[in-house]
Image (tube, rainbow, N blue to C red):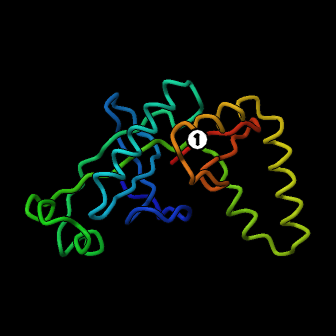
Amino acid sequence: KYLRPAVDGCMGLMKHVAELTWSDGIQRESYIKLYGENKKRALLNEALGYLLISGLKLPQPELAGFLEFKISEETTPEVWAQASEVDKYRGITYAWVCTNTGGINRRIEIDNANSPELKNYLAALVIEALKNCEKLPNLIMCDDWLANNDRNMGNLLELPNRSFTLID
């Protein structure tokens, strides 16, 4: 069930939040990210990153995986326009999905601050929380190991307990 567009992140097509029923029968709010023709590499990157981070027992969404997504020129024209010929023929493409962590994207909060003073204050709060994050050295080592050069405040989400979780 479609809930709303995802306001953060710029990779992928038609990134949105939906309520999905997972294989255990439980409905969870989840992010869905579709890709264009570069999807094979993007989907592989998402899956490998998720599996490796799981193996390192670092915080990330509880569940993730692939979702078969029906496409057509009429119902999903923005995805259809960037789909491969094979996907168009089959009428399906694949999306990456992960459960919502409930984390806060501080980048959006800082970007939307109305004054430089507020931006600086919010940035200082994030820096202080990161300094106190017990797993920060492991998060940095993980990104270095994975050669992830895209870690930013938009995909290092702050949780209510002032710890952080990785996405992307």
Identify the image quadrant of residue 21.
Answer: top left
In this orientation, which residue lies closer to the viewer: 98 or 84?
84
Identify the image quadrant of residue 122.
Answer: bottom right
At a point 36% along the width and 48% down the height, the residue shown is 96
At a point 34% along the width and 28% down the height, the residue shown is 24
At a point 23% along the width and 49% down the height, the residue shown is 68
At a point 61% along the width and 51% down the height, the residue shown is 151
Relative to residue 123, is residue 83 drawn left or right? left
Position of 146 relative to 107 (above/below): above
Which amino acid, mark 1? Asp
Identify the image quadrant of residue 135.
Answer: top right
Position of 52 relative to 96 (above/below): above
Residue 161 at what x, y percent from top left? Answer: 75, 35
Give the tally of numbered discs. Answer: 1
- Tag 1 secondary structure: helix
Q: Residues within 10 Å of mark 1 (few under 14, many from 20)?
A: some
Judged from this view, the residue extending furthest toward the left is: 89
In this orientation, which residue lies closer to the viewer: 150 or 81?
150
Position of 111 relative to 57 (above/below): below
Residue 164 at what x, y percent from top left? Answer: 68, 39
Relative to residue 117, is residue 102 drawn left or right? left
Residue 79 at what x, y percent from top left? Answer: 28, 69
Relative to residue 123, is residue 93 drawn left or right? left
Residue 133 at what x, y percent from top left? Answer: 77, 34
Please give the residue where the numbered disc 1 appears in the rendered image. 143
